[in-house]
Image (cartoon, rainbow, N blue to C red):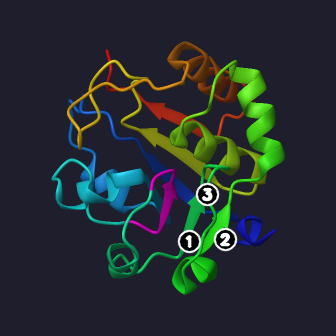
Amino acid sequence: MIFEDYFKNKTMALIGNASSVQGSYKHDIENHDIVIRLNKGFFLINNLHFGTKVNMLGLSMPIKTEILESLDLDYILWCTPKHELKTKYLKRVAYNYPKDWWNILNYTLGARPSTGCMMLDFIYRTGTYKSLKIYNFDFWNSPTFYTNTIHLGNHNPEQEKAYLEALLFLDKRIEWIRNDI
């Protein structure tokens, strides 16, 4: 799998979209080998708390191809089984989160997994990273910064939090930078 080589021995930051930021993490995030943002989270790249670096994007919503091309991403992980990647650019840089993994995660959570949960699962399953820090995940305790709303949809915040906590127990390379306390 291409991502096993891409993630191998890399320090990684996974940036969520919660608006509950209480500290400045810019310098820490900028120092990671790979920074992954979610959905419209790339709009945070001008935010003092989150630096400007973005190498990869986890997506579950359509975003105009010209906007994505302007980010000069290494990769995009398409985190929804509903749509196909149709443009030439997306076919070159985007990969689908495996449908079998989606089914397992959906069953495990008892609900449709969020983009952040799928991205976390994807990174964990590769197993080749040096470290992974999770930033700005508060499991819908605050609004998403780009909509200023809490839209749970069909997600299960308690189960997603429990899933992250299980991974923290199983893999000491993962660290959750808490900002919801």
Element at label 2 = helix
Inspect the image, locate mark 2, and give the three-letter code of the amino acid beneath it. Tyr
Q: Quadrant of the C terminus?
A: top left
Q: Is residue 5 above or below residue 113?
A: below
Q: Quadrant of residue 70?
A: bottom left
Q: Residue 150 at what x, y percent from top left?
A: 31, 24
Q: Quadrant of residue 8?
A: bottom right
Inspect the image, locate mark 3, and give the three-letter code of the amino acid beneath it. His
Q: Residue at x 36, y 70 (%)?
A: 64
Residue 154 lies in the magenta stretch: no
Q: Residue at x 77, y 53 (%)?
A: 98
Q: Residue at x 33, y 20 (%)?
A: 180
Pointer 1 residue: 75
Q: Quadrant of residue 138?
A: top left
Circle count: 3
Please rate how many residues cluster around mark 3, counting C-alpha atoms within 10 Å: few if below 14, some from 14 to 19, many from 20.
few
Q: Are marks 3 and 2 in contact (CB under 8 Å)?
A: no
Q: Residue at x 51, y 19 (%)?
A: 157
**Which circle marks residue 6 in the picture?**
2
Pointer 3 residue: 83
Element at label 3 = loop
In front of the other: 40 or 28: 40
Please rate how many residues cluster around mark 1, counting C-alpha atoms within 10 Å: few if below 14, some from 14 to 19, many from 20.
some
Q: Is residue 110 left or right of residue 160?
A: right
Nearer the camera: disc 3 or disc 2: 3
Nearer the camera: disc 1 or disc 2: 1
Read off the magenta span: 54-61
